[in-house]
C-alpha cells in the first residue's frame, strides 16, 4: 500500500514538473497542451512569438518582415507552398487560444495604464484637483506638495504616451530638454507590474560658456536634482505607491 502511494506521489510530481515547466520555444506545442503556469513570466512580445511559432512550425509564410526573417533563420522552418494548405491540430488551436488570451490580458493592462496616464495628464493641465487627487491622493497632499505636482505636470507634458517603446516586459520613453543653461530629462519606464515617471535636472547646456548673467536667467543654473513617482499597474488601472527624490 505504501509502495503504491509512493508511486502515485512520484507520478503526480512528474506530471506537475512537466506541466509546470517554463517553455522557451514551441517545439512541444503540437503534442502538449500548454498551461498558464508555464507562461506566467512571459512578456507580451514573447507570447506573440510563441503563438506565431505554432504557425511557423506548420510552414506558414509570413508577410510581416520581422517574423519572416526570424523564422526563415530557424533550422526547422520549412515554408509551405500555400498558407491555405495549413491546418492546425486541435491541440495547436487550443494553445493558440491560450497564448492569445494571455496576450490580451497584458495588452489590456497596458492600455488601461496608458489611458489613466492620459487622464492624469489632462487633469494636471486643467488643474482638476478632484481627478489629480484620485490618482495621487493616497500618497500626496496636493495643497502641500504643489511643487511635486508641478514637476509631475512638467514631466507628463514632455512624455509622449503614444510613443512608448516596448521590449519584452519593459516599456520606455525618454526626452532631454536643453534650455541653454541646463538639461532637464524626463522618462517613463514600464517594468512588469509597475511604472516609473522620473525627472532630472543635470549638467550644463551645450552652449553654456561660463558663469554669466542674462535677462532670461539671473541665476546660473538650477540645482541638480532627481525625482520619481512609482505607480503599480493593476487590472483596474494605475495606483501611486511612492514619491521620492534627491538633490
Image (cartoon, rainbow, N blue to C red):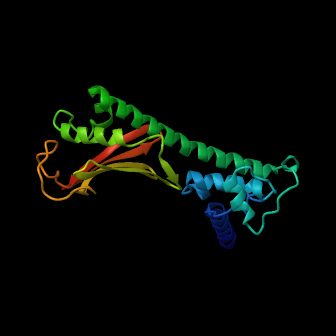
Number of numbered discs: 0
Q: Position of residue 161 (x, y in %)?
A: 44, 41
Question: Does residue 41 show up?
Answer: yes
Q: Position of residue 208 (x, y in %)?
A: 22, 56
Is 215 on the left-hand or right-hand side of 205?
left
Question: Does residue 26 show up?
Answer: no
What residue do we see at 25% from left, 42% from top? Answer: 151
Q: Position of residue 16 (x, y in %)?
A: 63, 62
Is 29 on the left-hand or right-hand side of 131?
right
What residue do we see at 68% from left, 73% from top? Answer: 3
The answer to whether 121 is drawn above or below residue 167 in the figure is above
The quadrant of the image that shows the N terminus is: bottom right
The residue closer to the viewer here, 1 or 159, is 159
Q: Quadrant of residue 30?
A: bottom right
Q: Quadrant of residue 124?
A: top left
Is 145 on the left-hand or right-hand side of 100?
left
The residue closer to the viewer here, 208 or 27, is 208
Is 62 on the left-hand or right-hand side of 188?
right
Q: Position of residue 107 (x, y in %)?
A: 55, 43
The quadrant of the image that shows the C terminus is: bottom left
Amino acid at each position: 500500500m505504501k509502495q503504491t502511494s509512493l508511486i502515485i506521489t512520484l507520478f503526480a510530481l512528474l506530471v506537475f514538473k512537466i506541466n509546470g515547466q517554463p517553455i522557451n520555444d514551441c517545439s512541444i506545442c503540437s503534442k502538449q497542451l500548454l498551461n498558464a503556469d508555464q507562461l506566467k513570466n512571459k512578456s507580451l512580445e514573447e507570447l506573440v512569438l510563441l503563438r506565431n511559432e505554432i504557425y511557423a512550425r506548420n510552414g506558414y509564410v509570413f508577410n510581416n518582415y520581422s517574423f519572416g526573417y526570424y523564422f526563415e533563420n530557424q533550422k526547422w522552418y520549412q515554408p509551405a507552398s500555400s498558407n491555405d494548405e495549413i491546418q492546425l491540430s486541435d491541440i495547436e488551436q487550443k494553445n493558440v487560444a491560450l497564448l492569445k488570451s494571455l496576450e490580451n490580458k497584458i495588452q489590456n493592462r497596458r492600455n488601461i495604464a496608458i489611458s489613466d496616464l492620459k487622464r492624469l495628464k489632462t487633469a494636471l493641465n486643467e488643474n482638476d484637483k478632484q481627478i489629480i487627487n484620485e490618482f495621487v491622493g493616497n500618497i500626496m497632499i496636493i495643497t502641500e506638495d504643489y511643487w511635486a505636482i508641478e514637476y509631475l505636470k512638467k514631466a507628463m507634458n514632455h512624455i509622449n504616451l503614444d510613443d512608448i517603446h516596448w521590449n519584452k516586459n519593459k516599456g520606455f520613453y525618454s526626452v532631454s530638454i536643453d534650455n541653454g543653461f541646463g538639461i532637464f530629462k524626463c522618462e517613463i519606464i514600464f517594468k512588469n507590474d509597475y511604472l516609473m515617471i522620473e525627472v532630472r535636472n543635470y549638467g550644463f547646456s551645450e552652449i553654456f560658456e561660463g558663469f554669466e548673467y542674462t535677462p532670461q536667467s539671473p541665476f546660473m543654473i538650477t540645482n541638480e536634482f532627481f525625482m520619481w513617482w512609482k505607480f503599480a499597474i493593476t487590472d483596474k488601472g494605475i495606483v501611486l505607491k511612492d514619491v521620492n527624490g534627491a538633490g
